[in-house]
């Protein structure tokens, strides 16, 4: 196991992202309502929890669960396991996910949010691939093509509980 992002780096960057997102909402949004933060389960639950606790502004929260991986295979398409519950009409929404690989999961999440007539939608990911799809408005860290786990990201359903992010050797 090789740590590529330490828990201290994660903690610091999550606090910075919370400030950036809050400022973005306060400065750029013409919508007087609090933003809605949508957690894409399962991978982003640690990131989402830490991020929402750091937000200096009021927020609503909701959860969706989309499944695209079986182990390390993402060729089976996207399955909706849990749908949105909040009314998003006219609200600014931030979709929070762990990583955007092929973009298929994020496209489904964007479709789900936009179909509920959100006024604005932004994408926030903890990790962004250097040569990946450019779908994020905010991201924590840029990584290469390595497969990673820890801090919510899994290796065949395990290792989500690790506080650092590791690459598989």
Image (cartoon, rainbow, N blue to C red):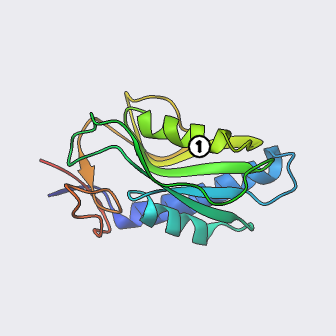
Question: Please, which residue is most extreme toward the left here?
Answer: 169
Q: In this view, does 64 lie to the left or right of 26?
A: left
Give residue 41's quadrant in the image.
bottom left
- The relative height of residue 21 versus residue 28 in the rendered view (above or below) is below
Q: Is mark 1 on a helix, strand or loop?
A: helix
The quadrant in which the N terminus is found is: bottom left
Above or below — where is 144 with respect to 53?
A: above
138 on left or right of 3: right
Number of residue marks: 1
* Res 84 visible: yes
Is residue 137 among what the camera can see?
A: no
Where in the figure is residue 15, as x and y percent of width and height?
56, 63
Q: Position of residue 123 (x, y in %)?
A: 58, 43
Q: Which residue is drawn at 16% across and 49% down?
A: 168
* Residue sitting nearer the eye, 82 or 63: 82
Tell me where residue 85 appears, x and y as whole percent: 63, 60
x and y, in percent, of residue 86 in the image: 68, 60
Using the image as rendered, state which of residue 73 and residue 80 is in the foreground: 80
Residue at figure coordinates x 21%, y 44% from the top left: 72
- Residue for badge 1: 112
Bin the neighbour count of mark 1 within 10 Å (Cα to Cα): few under 14, some 14-19, many 20 and up: some
Q: Could you tell whether 12 is left or right of 142 in the image?
A: right
Residue 68 falls in image quadrant: top left
- For the point 77% across and 50% down, the residue is 91
């Amino acid at each position: 196991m090789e740590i590529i992002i330490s828990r201290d780096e994660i903690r610091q960057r999550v606090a910075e992202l919370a400030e950036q997102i809050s400022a973005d909402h306060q400065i750029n949004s013409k919508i007087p309502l609090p933003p809605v933060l949508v957690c894409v389960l399962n991978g982003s639950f640690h990131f989402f929890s830490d991020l929402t606790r750091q937000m200096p502004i009021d927020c609503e929260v909701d959860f969706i669960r989309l499944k695209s991986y079986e182990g390390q295979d993402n060729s089976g398409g996207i399955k909706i396991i849990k749908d949105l519950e909040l009314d998003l009409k006219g609200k600014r929404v931030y979709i929070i996910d762990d990583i955007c690989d092929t973009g298929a999961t994020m496209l489904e999440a964007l479709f789900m949010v936009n179909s509920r007539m959100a006024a604005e939608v932004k994408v926030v990911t903890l990790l962004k691939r250097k040569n990946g799809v450019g779908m994020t408005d905010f991201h924590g860290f840029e990584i290469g093509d390595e497969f990673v786990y820890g801090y919510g990201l899994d290796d065949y359903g395990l290792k989500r509980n690790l506080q650092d992010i590791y690459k598989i050797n």
